[in-house]
Amino acid sequence: MARGHVGGGEHRTPNAFVAKLCGHGLLPAEDMSLLDSVCGTQRDIPARQDLIREGDEPGPVFVILKGWACRYKLLPEGTRQITSFLMPGDCGDLHASVSHRMEHSIATLTPARVAKVDRKEMEDLIETRPAIMRAFLWTLLVDEDTLRAWIVSMGRRDSVQRVAHLMCELYVRALNIGLTVGDQFEMPLTQIVLGDALGLTPVHVNRVLRKLKGSGVMSLSRGSLVIADVAKLATVAGFDDTYLHRRLRRPPAGREQ
């Protein structure tokens, strides 16, 4: 992927990064204001553009405010392994400050709005604001547990279980940040991208998606995932969302979240 020029934009939307950190527990108003202020430098970035590449020196911290991105590694023969998906509110590479070189790349998958945060400024907030530090520790815990869940999928789940598990995970993550509408949400991931994340060929991914659709549990078309039977899909996947450590605010009876 070639790194592209990033363009500016003046319109500010509600800060998904602050909202995500509040998912662990409501932050003090001053902390929320400080986090929002460090995200002041925002840019609209096209799809399929590297934010930083493996081997680069760590620079600013990238925060995804809108759109999708991913962490990935390129193998010597040119194949790509996606190691995580970044959704609105996710922070790309804060931990990289302890390294002299990036050990993975981060790229947009869709057009995205990204905040570039000065690394020292972010680290100072974490060191001096206890509530922000606890929120970041929570996000790191979720990231680590999610990576472990992916390792289990790659090592022990068959292709149907692997696809079903990822669909459940992305649905729960989208639900937790308010991106779902009923039983569906926009998931603009191609079968090539899904294959790179799951260790499957696009043809195999297509075959599994058709099988899951035929069983009546879910369908994925035109960038929209519809889960017809969440409980059945979770059973197929052997999915337990404990590793996501989510803090959902339950909606009143009869209302969708």
Image (cartoon, rainbow, N blue to C red):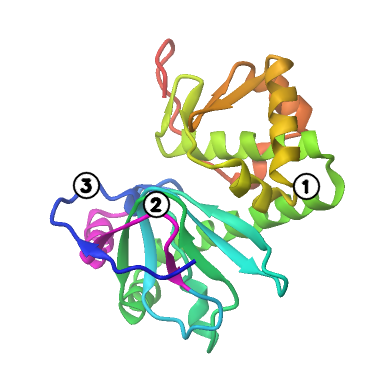
Which of the two discs, 1 and 2, sits closer to the camera? 1
Residue 108 image point, x, y percent = 44, 57
Residue holding disc 3: 13
* Separation (CA) of disc 1 from disc 2: 25 Å
Give residue 2's position: percent from left, percent from top.
44, 69
Instruction: For mark 1, give the secondary structure.
Output: helix
The residue nearer to you, when weighing 50 against 140, is 50
Residue furthest bottom as drawn? 100
- Residue at 49% from the left image edge and 36% from the top image edge: 187
The residue range painted magenta reads 27-52
Image-quadrant location for residue 207: top right
Q: Is 70 displayed left or right of 117 in the figure?
A: right
In the foreground, 248 or 104: 104
Amino acid type of disc 1?
A: Ser
- Please determine whether, in this image, residue 185 is positioned above or below residue 69: above
> Mark 1 sits on what residue?
153
Going by the image, does 198 lie left or right of 142?
right
The amino acid type of the residue labelled 3 equals Thr
